[in-house]
Amino acid sequence: MLRRTLFALTALAFAAGAQAAATVGQPAPDFTLKDASGKTVKLSDFKGKHVVLEWTNPGCPFVQKHYNSGNMPATQKDAMGKGVVWLAINSTEKASRDYLEPAKLVAWKQERKSAPSAILMDEEGTVGKAYGARTTPHMYIVNPQGQLIYAGGIDSIPSASADDIPKATNYVKVGVAEALAGKPLTASNSRPYGCSIKYKS
C-alpha cells in the first residue's frame, strides 16, 4: 500500500512538473541569471530577436559528442551569424562532481571554439525547472515575440556517437533557418536526449 501511495505521489509530482514546464506555442518563461563573468542577463533583454537556449554540462558524454566533434560550436556559429542570440545555461548544482566553476566552464568551451552570446549559471536550477529542461543538451528556440517555438533534442539520432551526427537532422539548425524565413517549424517538439541534469535537490 505504501509503495502504491509513493508511486502515486511520484506520478502526481511528475504531472505537476510537466504542467509547469514551458510549452511550445506559449510565452517562454522570462528569467534573470548571472553570466560566467558575473553580469546580469535577462531573456526579455533580447525581445525582438530569435534566441536559442542550450542546457549544457561538459561532464556529459552527449555534450562532449556535440562539442568535441565541433557540431555544437558550428550550430552556434551558424545561428549567431544570422543574428540569433545563443544562451548556454548550466543548471548543474555546485555539489555535483560535474560542476565546473564559471571560469573553467568558459575555458572548456573556448578550447572547443565555442563562443555563445552568453554562458549563464543556474546552480539553483530555477530556470532549468521553469523550462522543464531534463537533459544535457536540451534545446529551445524562442521567437522575437518571446514565444517558445521549439523544445527538444539538438538532432534526430539520440546517441553518444559522433559518427551519427552527419546522418542526423539538426533540429536546431533547421528550426532557426525556418523561423528566420518566416515559416512554421517542421519539427517544433522532439524528444530530448543526453544526461539527466544534476539539479539541486
Image (cartoon, rainbow, N blue to C red):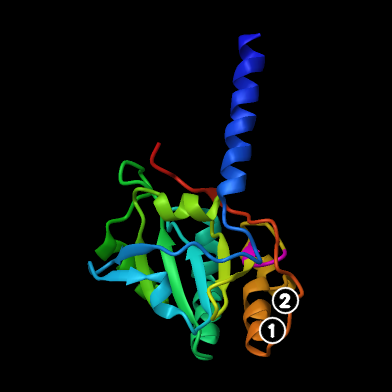
Q: Which quadrant would residue 89 be assigned to in this image?
A: bottom left
Q: Is residue 117 above or below residue 5?
A: below
Q: Nearer the viewer, residue 179 or 121?
A: 179
Mark 1 or 2 closer to N-term? 1
Q: Secondary structure at mark 2?
A: loop
- Name above or below for residue 104 compared with residue 92: below
Say which residue appears at 69% left-offset and 74% top-offset: 166
- In the visual, does 41 lie left or right of 192? left
**Amino acid of disc 2:** Leu
Residue 158 lies, in percent from the top left, at: 68, 57
Q: Provide residue 60's location: percent of width, then percent of height.
A: 49, 53
Mark 1 surroundings within 10 Å by alpha-carbon count, few (fewer than 14), some (14 through 19), many (20 or more) = some
Q: Is residue 166 magenta?
A: no
Q: Is residue 22 left or right of residue 197?
A: right
Q: Residue furthest right?
A: 186
Which residue is at a point 68% across and 79% down the rendered structure image?
Answer: 174
CB atoms of marks 1 and 2 within 8 Å: yes
What's the magenta region? 151-156
When the figure is inspected, residue 124 is found, relative to residue 69, above or below; the finding is: above
| Picture quarter with the C terminus | top left
The residue tagged 1 is: 178
Q: Which residue is mark 2?
A: 185
Going by the numbered disc 1, the residue's amino acid type is: Glu
